[in-house]
Image: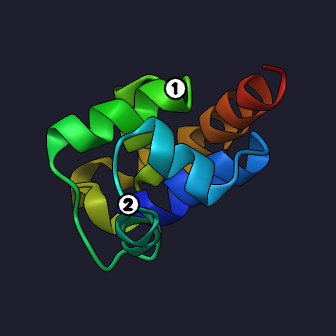
Amino acid sequence: MDLGSTIKDIRKQKGIRQNALAELCNISQTYLSQIENNQKEPNISTLKEISAQLHIALPILFFLSLNEADIPQSKREVFQIISPTVKTLIKDLIADE
């Protein structure tokens, strides 16, 4: 799971500066930077606030963060088939906001 990079990508796609998102979430810019660089794992309340400020549902944020290693071997083939399409659709929807 690459949650930090996903948060960073969405933030940049929405044109939000790191310091602005940190302020909206009531966390330090340093902490947000550590989250985005996968150096710190935020608690669920911080993730909820980040997703709320990015206007993206938390489950969608989690889905966008998934990679093949996160999926059980028995379901990887299905994940490989649907994931690219679903992720592209979600990213297109985010871009249209």
Residue 94 shows in this picture: yes
**What x and y, as percent, mark residue 33?**
46, 71
Q: Quadrant of residue 28?
A: bottom left
Residue 96 is left or right of residue 20, and the answer is: right
Going by the numbered disc 2, the residue's amino acid type is: Ser
Residue drawn at point x = 56 percent, y = 38 percent: 82
Residue drawn at point x = 18 percent, y = 36 percent: 45
Label of residue 56 in the image: 1
Image quarter where the C terminus lies is top right
Residue 84 is left or right of residue 23, and the answer is: right
Residue drawn at point x = 25 percent, y = 42 percent: 46
**What x and y, as percent, mark residue 87?**
62, 40
Q: Which residue carries the number 2 mark?
A: 28
Residue 93 is left or right of residue 47, and the answer is: right
Examine the rendered structure and indicate whether residue 41 appears above or below residue 92: below
**What x and y, as percent, mark residue 77?**
43, 52
Q: Quadrant of residue 51?
A: top left
Asked if marks 1 and 2 touch (Cβ < 8 Å), the reply is no
